[in-house]
Amino acid sequence: MKLGWFQIVRLGLVQMCLGAVVVLTTSTLNRLMVVELALPAVLPGLLVALHYGIQITRPNWGFRSDTKGNRTTFIIGGMAALSLGAFVAAVAVVLFPSGFALGLALSVVAYALIGVGVGASGTSLLALLATATEPRRRAAAATITWLMMILGIAVTAGTVGALLDPYTPALLLEIVGVVTGGAVVLTALAVWGIERRVVAEREAETLPFRQGMAEVWAERKARVFTLFIFLSMTAYFMQELILEPYAGLVFGFAPGESTQLSGAQNGGVFVGMLLVGIAATGLRWGTLRMWVTGGCLGSALSLIAVAALGQTGGALVPAVVALGFFNGMFAVAAIGSMMALAGQGRGAREGTRMGLWGAAQALAAGFGGLVGAAAADALRLVMPVEDAFGAVFLAEAALFLVAALIALRVIEGRGGQRLPDAQLIPGE
């Protein structure tokens, strides 16, 4: 059996819970540390980077869910670890005023636990989707699950922000406890029984992780797609920390206007994701390869426009909305392609491949944001501000163009035809 629409939505609830818990740490706790506690902004930045770095363990979690034959356990267990980490992180925020060393030590443990939980739960969830979703429904499944994650982020951030005013430590722990506890319960209810109905039972394997990982890494398609994920996601995240400062420094946007700019960009992402889900699944128009390459090329052109506007002046908002639109198109199609490619190659390794690509995505998220901000700061020392930011945006555009070329080589074309493995890497 394959996943029905109701089951896909149920698994989307898990993704919604992941977004809801993670945003507590990246938004609410981040603000409390910097504003209420007057701690250096680099501290929460390093903690978030730690949670991304820990996700290099994703291949291991994917391999475990492959060989143990029970992804449900890893999905629920990972959510429990993530939720515990988020709650401990909130406790650390409360303890910082009475002892910085204690608060910092507890925060490090908490964010490491958050990284482990996201890796275990998120990788196993995507592996289950890849294993049990019909090919024609993959784009829609990716759209549904990612839009639900965005919904979880938006609703949690807005609701927690409203309930936490006026702030007290006791209120913070109460709210975080409700959100994290609710996420674990909802995840268990959402995923329970699905795997048993759609995936045939198999005996657990005793293969060592290193051997299983070597088998997957030996597949050229898996290696090339890993490179695609890393390059495209580095480009995707490079603008995350510099777009609003660019709008303020070059275009004179006020803080409220730059925040609205970010909202407009996310609106574009939402529409781009929705378009791919409807067109690729509902209308059966185009292929995942077309949508991925189109999203990469459109993102590159939008970034070139954003850079050019800094030189010529003009309306920045339409270019940023276009960037969000093509980013959303690329992201959903890339996730659908992950689901398709995860089942190609040696059998019973969907989770390992998803883990490998998830690790590449997590590392690119941390690396891209850091490199984008550092490059903009360094270039501003030697050239005008609009040129410095523009150079970074053009570098992002170049990465998207390279990613588009790789996507044309590795992702399936129309009718499921794909290039033979021997043709994936010229010269190999």
Image: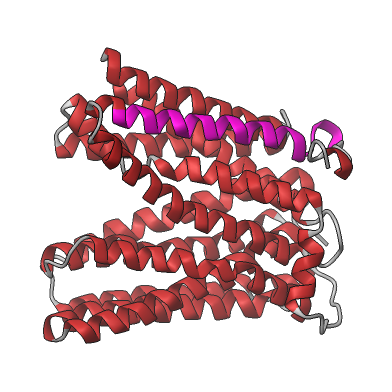
Q: What residue is at 51 percent from the left and 58 percent from the top?
A: 362
Magenta region, residue range: 388-416
Rendered image quadrant of residue 334: top right
Whether residue 410 is in magenta: the answer is yes
Q: Main secondary structure of the magenta part?
A: helix
Residue 228, compared with residue 149, is above or below; it is above
Q: In the drawing, does residue 218 fall left or right of residue 330? A: right
Q: Nearer the viewer, residue 24 or 404?
A: 404
Q: In the drawing, does residue 277 fall left or right of residue 379? A: right
Q: Nearer the viewer, residue 154 or 93?
A: 93
Rendered image quadrant of residue 6: bottom right
Q: What residue is at 60 percent from the left and 68 percent from the top?
A: 58
Q: Position of residue 298 (x, y in %)?
A: 53, 25
Give the residue at the far front of this rendering: 382
Counting the numbered discs, the total is 0
Whether residue 315 is in magenta: the answer is no
Q: Position of residue 324 (x, y in %)?
A: 44, 34
Q: What residue is at 50 percent from the left and 49 percent from the top?
A: 147
| Residue 140 in sight from this viewpoint | no
